[in-house]
Image (tube, rainbow, N blue to C red):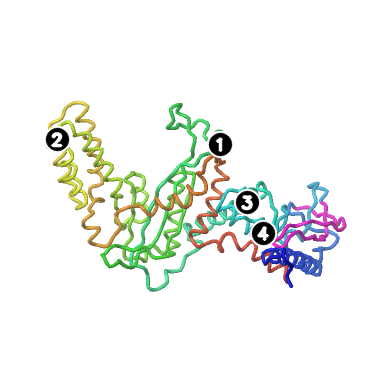
Amino acid sequence: MLGSGETLGVLEQAMRAALAASGARLLEAVLAGDGDGYAGPHAGCGNGHRAAYAGVRDKTVTTVLGAVTLRRAWYHCAGCRHGFAPRDCQLGVAGCSLSPGLAEMIALAGAEVSFARAAGLLAGLAGIAVSARTIERSAEASGAAARAAAEAEAAAIRERRIVPLPPREPVPDMLYVEVDGTGVPVRASETEGRQGKAEDAKAGTREVKLARLFTVSALDEDGRPVMDPGSSSYAFTFDGKDALARLVKAEYLRRGGNYFRQVVALGDGAAWIWTMAGDLYPHATHITDIYHAREHLHDLAAHLAFITPDPPAWLACRLEELDAGDIPAIIDAARAYPLDGVKASELDKKLGYFEHNIHRMRYGDFRDLGMFTGSGHIEAACKQIVVQRAKQSGMHWTVEGAADVIALRCQHASGRWNDFVAPRSATAGLRAAI
């Protein structure tokens, strides 16, 4: 019978603690029964030397069940002047005190919320006490490993050392490629010598460029395209447009881009986006984001407001022409008024945006073909993957630290967590159980 002061919640907490403690002791026993990793009187140190056996040493490792003690054969290399335990490498705990399973839990938590909040969540939900600093180091290490593995895969795909299989049948109708960028607040040392937009001209952020690839197979009842659920994959970099192009090329090939009936490149009108699209998928349809086009049209209308007889009506007519994709009509309407000097030069610049993208603004035709005309999906991706985690109040990152955490978020959002993050714990767990 439960006492009057006892509740189910108290019992749950007590049982969880007891089960975790029992599990830790059992895990400790299993690991002890698997040996201490003794490799003979000498073992290679990895640097071409022979290290000598120096007895057995204990190591405490924090696991998802709590702390366990490992007994490991220890070797010392006179040439390198350092020691090591082969057993640590076998279990995936060389150079760290966290088990692979706990490291994966930390990576998940650290990718989603601040490191301090992640520490609180792990303590509250799993009963594991880990400091925020430990979570930061572990999550960034997992992200760095995932980033390196993803970049290695991308290089192998581009060099045709890995040839991806064709997409599974039925192949979705369209593949979209969208790119955008956003600034991440970083430490002052990360922006030294860089031009900024602030009044003091000092940069406070570093731009991360993000690409989102997704497919469309059907239209809704109103004839509008619908993104296929779970079809998005992402690539990102802090290293500029050329680095992004390399990653996008690999992801395009991995997704089987050449097998799709239609590839669509959606962008805000920046020249480098179209150059990249022309190089990587030259058969793609290019579409300038209609929302950016509307912003430019509003700017154009404001420039001409002093001379147009009814500026609001003039803008309304031009917006209708834009929605229809009648860009020549917009250009003709804007040039119907004689301008001189600076005003004429500014008009040429503003109309240049429309003249250079005229074939990318056939919005009426694009809608009739069941295509997206707005780049809302990549803007949403920037918010979900970058802003929600890396642009919170008071945050100032190193570029490497931000890249490591964004890598975790990208792989999770791409459905590739098991490809780049989880295998570390799965492999180690398998070895421990054998």
Label drawn at residue 308: 2
Q: Which residue is mark 4?
A: 102
x, y percent for residue 272: 36, 45
Is residue 26 rendered to the left or right of residue 325? Answer: right
- Looking at the rendered structure, the secondary structure element under dot 3 is helix
Cα gap from disc 3 to disc 4, whole angstroms = 13 Å
Of badges 2 and 3, the one in the foreground is 2
Which kind of residue does numbered mark 2 sit on?
Thr
Q: If you read the primary sequence from the N terminus, does the residue marked by circle 2 or circle 4 appear first?
A: 4
Amino acid type at image mark 1? Arg
Residue in front for this viewpoint, 368 or 280: 368
Q: Could you tell whether 165 is left or right of 275 in the image? A: right
Crowd rating for badge 3 (residues with CA inside 10 Å; few <14, some 14–19, many 20+): some
Residue matched to label 3: 141
Q: Secondary structure at mark 1?
A: loop
Marks 1 & 4, CB-CB < 8 Å contact: no
Residue 372 tag number: none
